[in-house]
Image: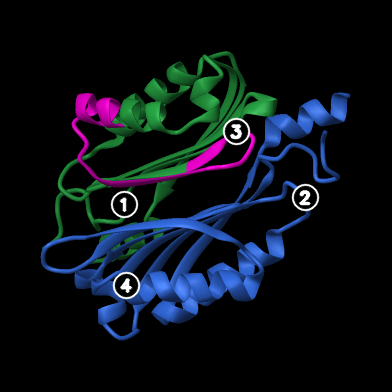
Chain colours: A blue, B green
Amino acid sequence: MLSQQGFPMNGLHLVGDLYECACDKQLLERAAEPLKRIRALCETAGLTVVGERAYEFDGGGYTLATLLAESHVTLHTWPEYDMVAMDVYVCNHTQDNSAKARALARGLVEMFASKKSAIKDIERGEIAERYAAAV
Amino acid sequence: MLSQQGFPMNGLHLVGDLYECACDKQLLERAAEPLKRIRALCETAGLTVVGERAYEFDGGGYTLATLLAESHVTLHTWPEYDMVAMDVYVCNHTQDNSAKARALARGLVEMFASKKSAIKDIERGEIAERYAAAV
């Protein structure tokens, strides 16, 4: 059965490129503390973590994914450039979770103390929306 | 040092919403075989898998992330709607990997036998591009 929010894939995907990250360099180099902070940010936002995985590169920097019941977070860091590529995708299966996605993304930008960032809003599920409208 | 492709974050992120997935239902319900096929697709495309994680929901459907040396793949499936949300992000640190990203995404669309899909191209690193142009 469809929820009030339409198809379950529908939701907000925030695609963020973060520059001039002025945080403690360790947060760009090693994944353990960021994974922990993502868990805390998700708990605060009311999102449910169901898994996580990270890989640290030789010389510093990592790629990580936190799986959510409501979709995912990914981070890729380049400490040598003070840059982070961030994705937060939160679907709206049972309720509109857009505010939670934005709160989580804001928390991550603050964690990295990014002084310059480009964050794109991607609305997932646009074809599904058209299907729903035609029903 | 910057590569010929500019900043390392730059790259192609394919954001795909796949509908009418007519594949074997197991591919939408359970993650093991899709994880295996992603590994094979990455090997064929010349991409390096550095980690993976999946979570299967009660009643079928899963969320998964495959971490790449070149960024990531994520999938979220809703077998009850024959839908998949797919992300393929491949950065261009040492060379333009866009063709590899497209090959991988094409392989995933074929795996799910999606008859209707919306795939957006997101160019990551646009602020970095402007920085590079100004140097």
What is the magenta range? B39-63
Query: Are labels 4 and 1 assigned to the same chain?
Result: no
Which residue is nearer to you in this view: B76 or B60? B60
Nearer mark to the viewer, of 3 and 4: 3
Amino acid type for the residue under numbered disc 4: Ala
Q: Please, what is the three-letter code of the amino acid marked with disc 1?
A: Asn
- The C terminus of chain A is located in which quarter? top right
Query: Of all residues shown, which one is farthest toward the right?
Result: A135
Q: CA distance from mark 3 to mark 1?
A: 35 Å
Q: Is residue B8 at all visible to an observer of this figure?
A: yes
Q: Quadrant of residue A114?
A: bottom left
Give the residue drawn at x 69%, y 30%.
A127
Cα separation, mark 4 vs mark 2, equals 31 Å
Place residue B52 in its image quadrant. top left
Q: Position of residue B30 (x, y in %)?
A: 49, 30
Q: Do circles 2 and 3 both sit on a common chain?
A: no
Name the residue rendered at 44%, 80% in the picture. A111
Q: Earlier in the sequence, mark 3 or mark 1?
A: 1
Q: Which mark is residue B60?
A: 3
Check disc 2 and report the residue beneath it.
Answer: A94
Q: Where residue A125 sits in the image (x, y, percent)?
A: 67, 37
- Would residue B61 be found to the left or right of residue A54 on screen? right
Q: Which mark is residue A32?
A: 4
From mark 2 to mark 1, how far is it between C-alphas?
35 Å
Mark 4, residues whose alpha carbon is within 10 Å: few (<14), some, or many (≥20)? few
- Residue position marked by numbered label 1 in the rendering: B10
**The disc labelled 2 sits on which kind of residue?**
Thr
Total of numbered circles in the picture?
Answer: 4
Residue B135 within the magenta-colored segment of the rendering? no
Q: CA distance from mark 3 to mark 4?
A: 30 Å
